[in-house]
Image (tube, grey):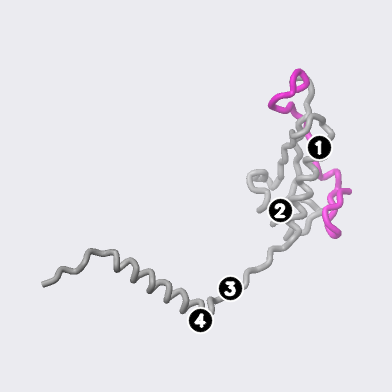
Amino acid sequence: MIAVTDDVNLDDTELEFSFVRASGPGGQNVNKVSTAVQMRFDARRSPSLPDDVSARLQALAGSRLTRDGVIVINASRHRSQERNRADAVERLVALIAKACVAPVKRRPTRPTKAAKERRLVAKARRAGVKAGRGKPAERE
């Protein structure tokens, strides 16, 4: 079990790992060893997540979410398979923890009367400055 928050725990069997060859520099090691990790987590059908958390998680996942509701995380920062695996799990846990926090609904506010007055005075002053920039009026 992977603890995300006090209420949410993930079962290890819900995570599916596949190891692929990492791109980039690494000498001969990069051609021989599959160190990069591709982790898949089915956010839509996970029994560990409440429905509201699952919906927020899918919205947060963005381009990492497939049409089937599976989150795919690629990890290739480290040179070892185990560290990349741990990195992928950490990133998923951080994403789920962020989804567990419900967004605070915005309370609409209105500007005060003094603020409206200050705005109108500033607009009038600015209009006067701009009006003074025009060509002088022709005299008779």
Give the label on residue 85, or none.
Answer: 1
For residue 27, above or below residue 108: above
Q: Are marks 4 and 2 in contact (CB under 8 Å)?
A: no
Of the pair 58 and 131, the residue shown nearer to us: 131
> Mark 2 — residue?
57
- Residue type (three-letter) at the residue carrying disc 1: Arg
Label for residue 108?
Answer: 3
Residue drawn at (68%, 52%), measured in percent from left and top?
58
Q: For residue 108, which quarter of the picture?
A: bottom right
* 2 relative position to 71: left or right: right
Q: Position of residue 59 (x, y in %)?
A: 66, 53
Q: Which residue is mark 4?
A: 113
Segment colored magenta: 1-30
Residue type, numbered disc 4: Lys
Viewer-closest of 34 and 51: 34
- Estimate how packed mark 3 is, as few (under 14), some (14 to 19) or many (20 or more) residues with alpha carbons within 10 Å: few
- Label 2 environment density (alpha carbons within 10 Å; few <14, some 14–19, many ≥20): many
In space, the residues marked 1 and 4 are separated at their CA atoms by 58 Å
Image mark for residue 133: none
Instruction: Reply yes or no: does residue 6 show up in magenta.
Output: yes
Q: Marks 3 and 4, how far apart in space?
A: 16 Å
